[in-house]
Amino acid sequence: MRIAWVKAIRRQDWVPSKYSRMCSVHFEEKFIMRSENGSCSLLKNAVPTLNLPTDNLYSTKSNTNY
């Protein structure tokens, strides 16, 4: 899954960590589990596909969240 995320995000030199996060607007609703208290989590097979850059827009060597 990690490789699929990196390909989808298209951020140069970005390596996701276990602490990396992404806003839910980048995922189809079918991949989001929402609880009654308003929190949400992703299904294990979720890959970001919505509202993503079309080119390599970022050039950074930092390991920050997207």
Image: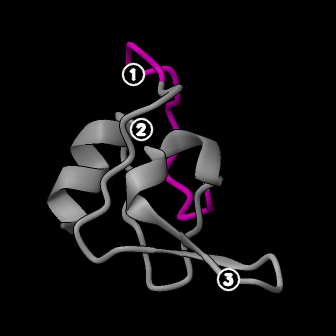
Q: Residues within 10 Å of mark 2 (few under 14, many from 20)?
A: some
Based on the displayed image, in which of its 4 quarters is residue 56 positioned? top left
Question: Magenta span covers which residues?
Answer: 53-65
Q: Is residue 66 magenta?
A: no
Q: Could you say which is closer to the camera, residue 44 or residue 13? A: 44
- The overriding secondary structure of the stretch rendered in magenta is loop
- Residue 33 lies, in percent from the top left, at 52, 73
Residue positioned 65% across, 53% down in the render: 23
Q: Nearer the viewer, mark 1 or mark 3?
A: 3
- Residue 55 lies, in percent from the top left, at 38, 14
Q: Residues within 10 Å of mark 1 (few under 14, many from 20)?
A: few
Between the residue at mark 3 and the residue at mark 2, the CA separation in whole angstroms equals 30 Å
Residue positioned 59% across, 67% down in the render: 21
Q: Is residue 6 left or right of residue 1?
A: right
Closer to the chain start, of discs 1 and 2, is: 2
Image quadrant for the N terminus?
bottom left
**Label annotation for residue 11:** 2
**Secondary element type, mark 3:** loop
Which residue has dot 1 on it? 56
Tags 1 and 2 in contact by the CB under 8 Å rule?
yes
Between the residue at mark 1 and the residue at mark 2, the CA separation in whole angstroms equals 6 Å
Q: Is residue 12 visible?
A: no
Q: Is residue 44 left or right of residue 49?
A: left
**Label annotation for residue 35:** 3
Residue positioned 56% across, 82% down in the render: 19
